Image (cartoon, coloured by chain):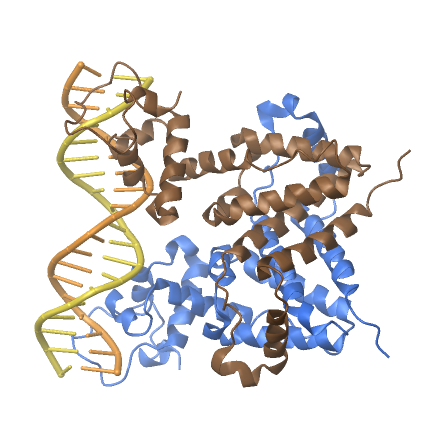
Chain colours: A brown, B blue, C orange, D yellow
Amino acid sequence: MPAVSATEGRPPGSAGTQRRRAGRPSAAVLDKAGITAAALELINRKGYDGLTMAALAKELDVAPSALYNHVAAKRDVLLLVEDHLTSLVDVSGFGPAPWEDAVRGWAWSYRNVFAEHTPLIPVIAVLPVTDAPQTLAMYETVSKGFLDAGFPQERIVSSIVALESFIFGSAYDVTAPADIFESGSMAEATPHFTAAVRSAAGQVDGPPADAAFSLGLEALIAGLGALREQRA
Amino acid sequence: MPAVSATEGRPPGSAGTQRRRAGRPSAAVLDKAGITAAALELINRKGYDGLTMAALAKELDVAPSALYNHVAAKRDVLLLVEDHLTSLVDVSGFGPAPWEDAVRGWAWSYRNVFAEHTPLIPVIAVLPVTDAPQTLAMYETVSKGFLDAGFPQERIVSSIVALESFIFGSAYDVTAPADIFESGSMAEATPHFTAAVRSAAGQVDGPPADAAFSLGLEALIAGLGALREQRA
DNA sequence: ACCTGAACACCGTTCAAGT
DNA sequence: ACCTGAACACCGTTCAAGT
């Protein structure tokens, strides 16, 4: 049950003038789904710098300390958001589509979701899957897709981890400023690099981050795909 | 000139009892090299949580506000550290060794350096190279290596970015706890994934992060290497 | 130009008190 | 069990004053 229902339909953030009086309310005001929704709303509106425990509490019309009845720390809030976002990643190709197409669709979707949420990447990378049911569900679907495609079982986890590492690194890349590789006053000292940057800029097919992602992803799909055993 | 020389050989952190009196000292106490060295010392001893402007100032035996005469913000300190660490990455294979071996050595070295410094990864990924001379020098060496190996000039930057994305993502992976994939109470609901994790654990050849890194890196080297033109 | 010292506007988190 | 409100121990950063 989202928290909004417990605030009698008042839109979050539009708190009435009178504060709730102290003491346990007859019905709980907060729950994890409501906290997750409010955190996402705040992130979309103000970015990750705006996601403070105080701002989150205000969004939910409670005192900051009330949040600690539902999460042990701010990290838990990030974890809730991460797990929700993972449920948005497209795994629908696994099963119907050929393995290459399924992986390609999954990887692009995964990168695109987290490119907007790079502050979560350090959290995901170290996240025990036990704490994230949607994330675990994604791994199950992807693992089954790899197994059915003829992957040797003992290479599946390493293959997924390798793809994920590339995906997370590439998500950062999307957020890089366009002039990140301008060597400026050092251009003379770095002629080969400067020439390579100029030459790449000549190609005008979409964002540079997409070109690098496509290049690396296709290499990984081809290389990992070769691990598959022949199937009938 | 490192700051230690300006504190008359006193080891950093072992400040004398009397404070320096206010006003400009006759010789500058701080400089960027000294700030970088003190930051690295602090990171090695206390980790990135211990790297605060206050702790850094104490290490250098100055008031926190003194740092702001040399850096505009904490982010600049991280940038100084990042550029120093990049100078430790091994690019010696480019030139003497075959391209595949040069890339392999560079990539493992790069990953190993930043696996210990993952909090810098969000900084690097968005870092204009102009602000980081050592980083720019690395790109120059690597670019020349790719060009000499027969890479088409317009694909060099994308190829390097793809490799770096994989390297940064893999650096996080090194820091993940060993039980990150234990599905725990959800094991029954995720049979394929759980079996894949068990099966991978059966293979006992080094850290799991190394297996995934090797797998992905070899796929990238093979796939990107195919972009090269034939050479005499 | 380059320090000190005081101050500012935060931050996440804890905990007693209330119902 | 689950809120409020006050408090704590920080944090990065600013700025006047001093030499």
Q: Is residue B145 above or below residue A156?
A: below
**Percent coordinates x, y for residue A149 in the rendering:** 80, 36
Q: Is residue A20 above or below residue B178?
A: above
Q: Mark yes or no: residue B94 visible.
A: no
**Percent coordinates x, y for residue A97 in the rendering:** 75, 36
Most distant residue in the right direction: A232
Most distant residue in the front direction: A204
Locate residue C16 relative to residue A205 in the image: left or right: left
Q: Is residue B108 above or below residue B37?
A: above
Q: Is residue A13 above or below residue A3?
A: below
Q: Residue at x 74, y 78 (%)?
A: B148
**Percent coordinates x, y for residue D11 in the rendering:** 30, 54
- Disc tally is 0
Locate residue B13 relative to residue B33 in the image: left or right: left
Asked which quadrant contains residue A128, the reply is: top right
Asked which quadrant contains residue A13, the reply is: top left
